[in-house]
Amino acid sequence: MSTRIALLGSINIGGNRIKMADLRDRMSARGFGEVETVAASGNVILSSEEEEEVLRGRIARLIEEEFGITGFVVVRTVEEVRSAIDDNPFHGEGSDKMVHTIFLPQQPVAGGFEALLEAHRDRGAERLALGDRVLYLDYVDGVGVSDLTGRFIEKRLGCRGTARNMTSLKRILAKMEEFA
């Protein structure tokens, strides 16, 4: 079995509230085995050999059926999380709380990243780079003052994403390595 992280998008923001203890209990009861959560923002560590798409679908269905939330889930391996930290070109240059990796279920649509860069030109100091199914983003002046909202990014890339800052990713990676 390989250790995976399920990154749940839009959990515990707005009205999408889920207690992590409830999520762990329901996932275990529905056959996911031993699961561990990291922070309250929807980071679930588990072991699975299922294909990524199948695992994503099962978790999204569980969230909808058990909690009434239409979920968005991205699944990554330990190596992919490590890569999301190590390959982020802004990591080590800015604050770990401002430097993010946005996990995407697939690569953006053709021309999507270029459209994002063009739409953002002259709108802020943020720095962006594209990786393999990830968008690297340095918010520089802070997330709360940025025009780069999830909706703004999604519209240009043609796919949703769920972001974690470097502080969170390092914590997630450490827990995944302990879990293995």
Image (cartoon, rainbow, N blue to C red):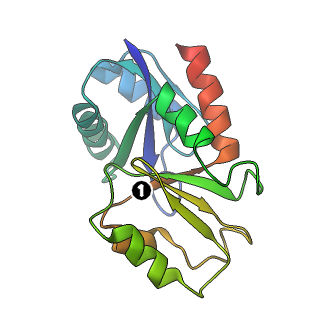
Residue occupying image coordinates x 57% and y 32%: 82
Residue occupying image coordinates x 29% and y 38%: 56
Is 71 situated left or right of 137 in this image?
Answer: left
Is 53 situated left or right of 141 in this image?
Answer: left
Is 93 situated left or right of 87 in this image?
Answer: right
Residue 179 point in image, percent of width and height: 55, 16
Residue pointed to by mark 1? 161
Q: Which type of secondary structure does the marked residue at label 1 adopt? A: loop
- Viewer-proximal residue among 112 and 69: 112
Is 155 situated left or right of 173 in this image?
Answer: left
Q: For the N terminus, which image quadrant?
A: top left
Q: Measured along the vertical axis of the image, is residue 55 above or below residue 70?
A: above
Check disc 1 and give the amino acid type: Gly
Residue 150 point in image, percent of width and height: 46, 68
- Viewer-proximal residue among 143 and 95: 95
Residue occupying image coordinates x 71% and y 69%: 142
Mark 1, Cα crowd under 10 Å, few <14 / some 14-19 / many 20+, is many
Residue occupying image coordinates x 38% and y 77%: 115
